[in-house]
Image: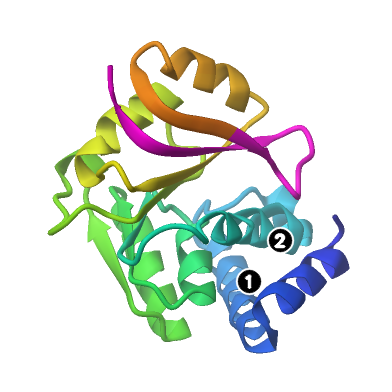
Amino acid sequence: MNEDQAREWVRNTFGISRENKLDAFADILRAGSSQQNLISASTLDTLWSRHLVDSAQLVPLASQAREGVWLDVGSGAGLPGIVVAALLDRPVVLVEPRAKRVEFLRDAAAALGLEVTVQHSKVETYQPTQPVAVVSARAVAELSKLLASTVHCTDSSTVWLLPKGRNAQSEVEAARRKWQGSFHVEPSMTQPDSGIVVAKGVRPR
């Protein structure tokens, strides 16, 4: 998927106004990356395919999730959290422990007019008022560790959407030794050799 194809997919899937919102976020990401290491400089020329659509492809996978909060763990540069908030009318909570990233996320959300909550903490200490509907996390931790740190925020109906790269299937197999639930790996639209773990009903064995 090249940059033109990535933009076209967003436009066709979410509409022009949402595409424009992501275009504005792309500008914010480029500017922010000159101030701190938000994304690899080598990926700036493929921002739409490598980062924006790579994040946006999670949204259709959440189509069966109940109403409620989308929790993005270790949001960093806002991928996928800010992208999700730009594409959905759903409350989004971004959990990020690094102060400079928290400041970036809050500034980006304000500039884009997004109703998001940025929580400055590790997810282990975050206590939602009720179980969240969706959990996402991009390049945060090995699957079993990620489930252990986040499961207190969820219930049996929570949908987990976790891009895991080439190791998705092996991480699922390892996690099944400690965790039960429905797990499957969805192929990534943007990186054919990568997978997204989609899980539901997650609980310890």
Question: Does 124 appear in magenta?
Answer: no
Q: Quadrant of residue 1?
A: bottom right
How far across and how far down the image is residue 39, in percent?
59, 52
Q: Quadrant of residue 66?
A: bottom left
- Disc 1 crowd rating (10 Å Cα; few below 14, some 14-19, many 20+) is some
Choose between 193 and 111: the one closer to the eye. 193
Span colored in magenta:
185-205
Instruction: Specify whether 176 is left or right of 51.
Output: left
Label 2 sits on what residue type? Leu
Label 1 sits on what residue type? Ala
Query: Image point 59% across, 27% down: which residue?
Result: 168
What residue does disc 2 label? 47
Q: Vertical placement of 119 versus 166: above or below?
A: below
Tell me the SS state at disc 2: helix
Which corner quadrant holds the C terminus? top left
Instruction: Specify whether 187 is left or right of 92.
Output: right
**Disc 2 or 1, which lies upstream in sequence?**
1
Query: Image point 48% across, 58% down: which residue?
Result: 64
Question: Does 194 appear in magenta?
Answer: yes
CA–CA distance between discs 2 and 1? Answer: 7 Å
How far across and how far down the image is residue 38, in percent?
53, 54
What residue does disc 1 label? 26
Choose between 42 and 49: the one closer to the eye. 49
The answer to whether marks 2 and 1 mark residues whose Cβ atoms lie closer than 8 Å is yes
How far across and how far down the image is residue 86, in percent?
51, 75
How far across and how far down the image is residue 152, in percent?
19, 39
Choose between 78 and 45: the one closer to the eye. 78
